[in-house]
Image: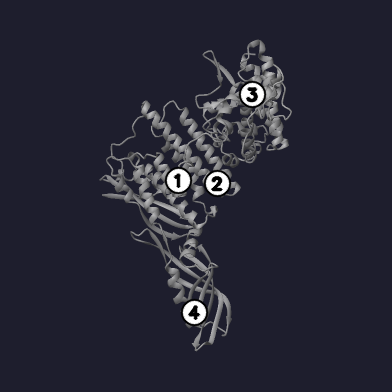
Amino acid sequence: MYRFVCRHWIAVRLCWALPALLPLPVLAVSIELPVSLDYAVVSDALKQQVFQGPEGNAELFRDRNDCNYLMLHDPRVEGTDTGLLRLTTRVSARAGTPVGGRCLLPFAWNGSIETFKEALVEPGSGRVSFRVTDSNILGGDVEGQRNMSGVVWNWIKDQVHPRLGAVNIDFGPAVTDLRALLQDALPVGEADPGLIANSLNLQSARAETDAMSVTFSLEAPAPPPDWAPTEETALTPEELAAWDAAWQSWDAFATWLVKDLATPAEPELRATLAEILLEARHELRDALAADVRDHDPVRSLFLSTWARLAPLLRSTDLNLPGARGMQVATFVSAANALEALDIAAPHLGLALDSNTLRRMARMLAPAVTEEQLAYDSRVDPQLRQLLGLEPELELEPLEDTPAAGPFAWLIAPAQAAAVSPALVKQLTGWIPAPNDLDRYLRTMEQLLDESIAAERKRGKVPAEYFELYEDMMRATAWQESCWRQFVETKGKVTPIQSSAGSVGLMQINQHVWRNIYDLDALLKNVGYNARAGNEILSHYLVDYAIKRKEHEVRGDIHDLARATYGVYNGGPRHLTRYRQDNTNAYLRGIDAAFWDKYQAIRKDGAEAVRQCYGG
């Protein structure tokens, strides 16, 4: 049997090109899964196994007369470019001859030493241990003698080396969890899931400059020579139900994951995680809108999201505490293994169902609950704050309008809302007749003006860009819905809604913005829909287009509007599509249509929207 070793992040795809050059078929492939382990994990192991004193110190020796003792303090772990771990620690040592109750010729030394340690994997144990290869004095103060004698230094080494060499990091629980995950994710078929899962082992460990590199290995059967992906066919009602359950499990998992990682993160990392979530949800939106649905939607969504998330989790900038670092390393190993198996052995047919996703979640957060991983549509203040929004976008109207006669609803309440409740009520269910179009457009323009004014008050958009923002907001509402919240379908007035789940005046997508906006209010309340669209546009304008200086690329400030609309329409990765030569014709057409509307709004204002109605 031939066997090839594939380093997952580098060449797993290339391994399948080699068998064509050989006379015999490849029966198995060995996959290597390297994971970066933050040195905080090593520090945590040192504290738990050696530095257990009340002040984080380690008393290695003390006789009953206090004549001889050795204490270590303040350990610091770092990598080297030689593949060894460097541990520096302060040392307090005293040596003398106890006679009666006295200590004769005492020698005291306070200083620092460094030890170099080689990481070793104990075969079959799932543990990384460390062997001290060298140690040096870095300096210190001597009391009692001019120089530190070789005898005393040897005594210190004899005490320090065994204790520091006894430290180990136990990956046994992680290996057990990973094997269980793989067995869950692999359906029973020609290949034995248990056999594949149990082939996963801890293979090697090495200290690198920035992190400890730990490698797992996994064996998978090669695809049969005649294997090819099956063609997709129409889904049965049962398969459609399973499809819905699968994507909802994935969406709930991805949302929980990003929130969990973002909670302790720095602002820049939080912003990146928020972008990853929005991208994942835009991809889900596209999958739901596709004419042909994949039988396994989660697999491709997971792999796409993981490609963006993995570099962050492999980064040493996370500064995770030890226990958390081990959880993240286990989670990364799990995701790496699933991705590698999908690449190296696609014929196995990974099944990333709710059970598999729950198991992955508990690798990262053992105490996560079913409720936290459940799919729901409730507004989540934490998720809104992750996007830089207020904890809640209040519904309009904020208060009931006093009943003071048959036309009382035309009067705004004394405590004015962001968008007038009177306007919201007036526009609710209104589908303008040709002879009523002027009044309708004036009323909708007033609602948009009030929504824009509320966004000005919020202060997100810098003053120098606000006029551009106003024109962009009006043009976007035109592009998305022709300034409509309601349409007539089969003689019934209903909120305007696309096949992809985008609703209302601003066509807010219910899958992308789940938990961030009240989905029922987006459908029924035109004022709320307008405010939601304002928030989204200002977020994309400020945090994407302006921040990434799209207006400086070609020297045209109005490119900010084009870039912002690209993100509004397609998600964060569409920021630059308006100026890319490889943008497909369909998206070019969308962007050209928006650009025409934006220019028309700048020139003619609301009057330009009459074009939507044949005017």
Name the mark nearer the viewer: 2 or 4. Answer: 2
For the residue marked with disc 2, what is the amino acid? Ala
- Image coordinates of residue 307 in percent, x first then y, are 47, 43
Asked whether residue 607 appears in the rendered view, the answer is no
Mark 2 element type: helix
Q: Looking at the image, is mark 2 or mark 4 earlier in the sequence?
A: 4
- Image coordinates of residue 431 in percent, x first then y, are 61, 16
Question: Which residue in the protein does label 4 denote?
Answer: 153
Name the mark nearer the viewer: 1 or 2. Answer: 1
> Are there few (<14), some (14-19), or many (20+) residues within 10 Å of tag 4?
some
Give residue 355's quadrant in the image: top left
For the residue marked with disc 3, what is the amino acid? Lys
For the residue marked with disc 4, what is the amino acid? Trp
Indicate the quadrant containing the C terminus: top left, top right, bottom left or bottom right. Answer: top right
Pick the residue in front: 234 or 521. Answer: 521
Question: Which residue in the protein does label 2 denote?
Answer: 262
- How far apart marks 1 and 2 lie (CA) works out to 15 Å
- Image coordinates of residue 564 in percent, x first then y, are 61, 33
Pick the residue in front: 60 or 30. Answer: 60
Question: Which residue in the protein does label 3 denote?
Answer: 597
Residue 361: assigned label: 1
